[in-house]
Amino acid sequence: MSERIALRYTVALLGFSDFERSGMSSFFRLAEARTPAYAEATQPDEADFLIANADHAPTVASVRQGERLLDTVFIGAHPPPGAVTCLHRPIEPTHIVRELDLLLEQRLASLDEPAAPDWMGSAPGLLGTADDGPHPKDVLVVDDSRVALRFLQVRLQQRGYRVHTAVTPDEALDRLAAQAFSMVFLDVALGPQASMDGLTLCQRIKQGRSQPDGTSPLVVLVTGLSTSSDRVRGALAGCDAYLTKPVMEDDLVQTLRMLDPPLAA
């Protein structure tokens, strides 16, 4: 499964003014530091995804002719028939990335392999997978987003961790009751159907000593909420570290080095 999931995707910008294109191009240069990374492509035919001006008829026609509606984030006042997603102006780059993540999630869901709850095997091209080293550490990743779950899973596996996953709070608690984990990476927003949010689950994990050995794992909150008050709520819930989405590589490495001294060594 893992060899079919890339860490970097290309995006072509179609039908925009020089001013709008310049602003989005600058953002995508920064977006190359996140995972999944999105880099601007020069050739639309070779791009994984498109961002198109919905108010420019020739652009809409070219997208439709190329049968790329399912790969396109439209921006404008009038989404074309059949469009999967459309954002209104003014252009907000972070919203574009969110929609690209959703398109990518739909693409991953269409893979013929089932989404296994644990991605334990090593894969060609991955460095430092769970098979390396005598005693790989078990970590749990909890997120209701298929994209966020898989990509954080890959990045942790690259650093030698044995990664387990859960998509609901109840599933996470069941896993914690069954075995001990050194760290838990926990999304704050776990979906409207979840029995509790990530802050409440963090409190349960840190206060309940729910692991078989009676200990509590280190908890890293991973969320798009980044204000000072959000961080205070995370600290009050008992988290040991706080990462904001999109998770940048330097921030992830710094957090791992802080919480896992052998990794830093």
Image: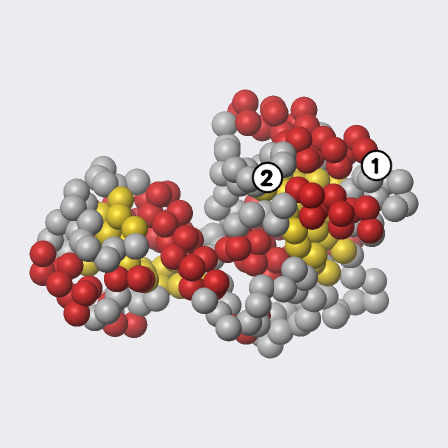
Q: Nearer the viewer, residue 93 or 76?
A: 76
Where, quadrant-wise, is the N terminus in this rendering?
Answer: bottom right
Figure quadrant of residue 115? bottom right
In the image, residue 44 lies at what x, y percent? 24, 67
| Circle 2: element type | loop
Q: Residue at x 34, y 52 (%)?
A: 28
- Quarter where residue 149 is shown: bottom right
Colour mapping used in the image:
secondary structure
Observer-nearest of 174 and 246: 174
Instruction: Name the front one of labels 1 and 2.
Output: 2
* Residue with the mark numbered 1: 209
Q: What residue is shown at x 35% (from left), y 43% (from top)?
A: 95
Q: Which residue is mark 2?
A: 194
Find residue 171 and report its horizontal and vertical position in percent.
69, 48
Q: Tag 1's secondary structure?
A: loop
In the rendered view, does 191 fall on the left or right side of 206? left
Image quarter in which the C terminus is found: bottom right
Q: Is residue 86 left or right of residue 15?
A: right
Q: Amino acid at mark 2?
A: Ala
Say whether residue 184 is visible. no
Dot 2, crowdedness within 10 Å: few (<14), some or many (≥20)?
some
